[in-house]
Amino acid sequence: MENNKDILNNTNNNYVIEIEHLQKSFDGRMILKDINLKVKKSENVVILGKSGIGKSVLIKCIVGLIFPDKGSIKVFGKEVTQMNHKELNEMRTRVGFIFQSNALYDSMTVRENLEFPLRRNKIINDKKEIDNLVYEALENVGLTDVIDKMPAELSGGMRKRISLARTLILKPEIILYDEPTTGLDPLTSREISKLINTIQNKYNASSIIITHDLECAKRTSNRILILQDGIFYAKGSFDDLKTNNDPFVKSFFITV
Amino acid sequence: MKKYLNNIFNRKKHKEGKKSTYDFKPSWLQNFLLELGGLSRFTGNFFRELFSYPFEIKEFLKQSYRMGLSTLPLIGITAFIMGLVLTLQSRPVLVDFGAESWLPGMVSVSIVREIGPVITALICAGKIGSGIGAELGSMRVTEQIDAMEVSGTNPIKYLVVTRVLATTFMIPMLIFYSDAISFYGSYVAVNMHGFISPQLFITQAFDPLHYFDIVPATIKTFFFGFAIGIIGCYKGYYSTNGTEGVGRAANSAVVISSLVIFIIDLIAVQLSEIIHIFSI
């Protein structure tokens, strides 16, 4: 088994994610035409773009849920498209993924949801240690009192936080957020944005955040990329893009 | 080869810049073949994961318990009625021929060889097959299966292998239970028109049953269970189009597995007849 440190040593220039000339098409329609992206350690990259443009496809390619047609995706310096099943699973334990729909397991309690990745990956077998980690993860998102509730009993914001806690329990080095504030009220959205920043500072994690929420983008981003027609149309900091004269880029920031 | 496939599926790619569509409208035969191919590949994946470590014994037991226990009342009621009605309907004909004493034997052969396994398997296809299709379908559309994969768990192994194994082993047990309850129903029906002791009923019921009645009927129940599990999992696992797709997955799981049960039954009957002829 390749050691985690060995994989990290392969990483060039402190980039944890390196994507080059990525292409992906569905049913003859090319969604991603030429995607190039590098994410540094502990950097938050926000991707903006219209719905159905391929933002979620891009992050699903990073974790190997969707395989690209062409191009290279390196995570921790290792090519995802050439990883075998075991390597893919090892990589996935170091990459967290927050799904748009939260994807909490309906048939399990909050505690079981959080224990699931720990038990499955056999990272820890000691029950006391697992309990401590579950409490720690729930404390991070401020929801220790819902530990024995079912996901259906929780509000949208709570489910999002539990989803974050389930991801954090494995202490990932990269977190991919698929529209983390969609469907939440402004106050909860702000709390989730704060939480994303807290996670970045506390765990030194790198993140790719896909969002339509400009406030979330403003609060969380170190860098913003705008995806349009299968390529990154514009890139820069929030303030750079806000003052950009391009009509398409302007159209994104018109409400702020 | 590519050109050949494109011709088969009538694919027309439009030039980029113009309207980009993908005209893939398979005929019913192509649809059937695609479905068959998909199911075969899925079954291959099931067998590949079945023999690989780690074995999900806890989840398998949980699914077996859930499937078996939840279906017991339904199977019990239908099996009792089945035995009772079959006996009541057959009695007048046998009375006309003065062969009323053959009634328990005739009913037992019908139940053990055919009616018990097929009716119980059809009920299980409706109850268990649709449940699996809907459960995995909703897990698919709410990205729970993707979440499982991302957290380093193989969903085929954790969700599919455990459920298919549970149906393969639980449905034969449910069929034994159903046969026993049907015998009781038959005993009640026989006693509606006179008294017969339980010992005499059992003797008369088991007397005409032979090795070739019980063994093929038992073997085919494992195939029924496997078919219900694999089809339910396949339809649910590849469910698309949101909640509408979940309903469609549950529905087609029942329809296809019911049809497959009859096909398996037909093959089993033919095979057992051939084996019986050669063994004489």
Image (spheres, rainbow, N blue to C red):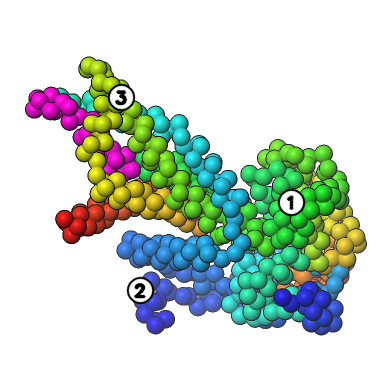
Q: Is residue B44 visible?
A: yes
Which quadrant, please, contains the N terminus of chain B? Answer: bottom left
Label placed on residue A91: none
**For the residues bearing labels 2 and 1, Cβ distance under 8 angstroms:** no
Chain under numbered label 3:
B
What count of labels does the image hold? 3
Where does label 1 land, which residue? A115
In the rendered structure, which segment of residues is drawn in magenta? B93-119
Which amino acid, by three-letter code, is at mark 1?
A: Glu
Chain under numbered label 1:
A
Where does label 3 land, which residue? B198
Q: Residue A240, percent across and down? A: 86, 70
Under circle 2, the secondary element is helix
Query: B218 left or right of B137?
Result: left
Image quadrant in which you'd find residue A211: bottom right
Q: Residue A123, percent across and down? A: 76, 61
Mark whose residue sits in front, 2 or 3: 3
Q: Residue A45, percent across and down? A: 80, 68
Label placed on residue B8: 2
Rounded to the nearest angstrom, the CA distance separating label 2 from label 1 is 49 Å
Under circle 1, the secondary element is helix
**For the residues bearing labels 1 and 3, Cβ distance under 8 angstroms:** no
Which amino acid, by three-letter code, is at mark 2?
A: Ile
Rounded to the nearest angstrom, the CA distance separating label 2 from label 3 is 64 Å
**Residue B107 magenta-highlighted:** yes
Q: Main secondary structure of the magenta part?
A: helix
Which quadrant, please, contains the C terminus of chain B? Answer: bottom left
Q: Is residue A250 visible?
A: no
- Residue appearing at x 77%, y 75% in the figure: A3
Mark whose residue sits in front, 2 or 1: 1
Which amino acid, by three-letter code, is at mark 3?
A: Pro
Rounded to the nearest angstrom, the CA distance separating label 1 from label 3 is 53 Å
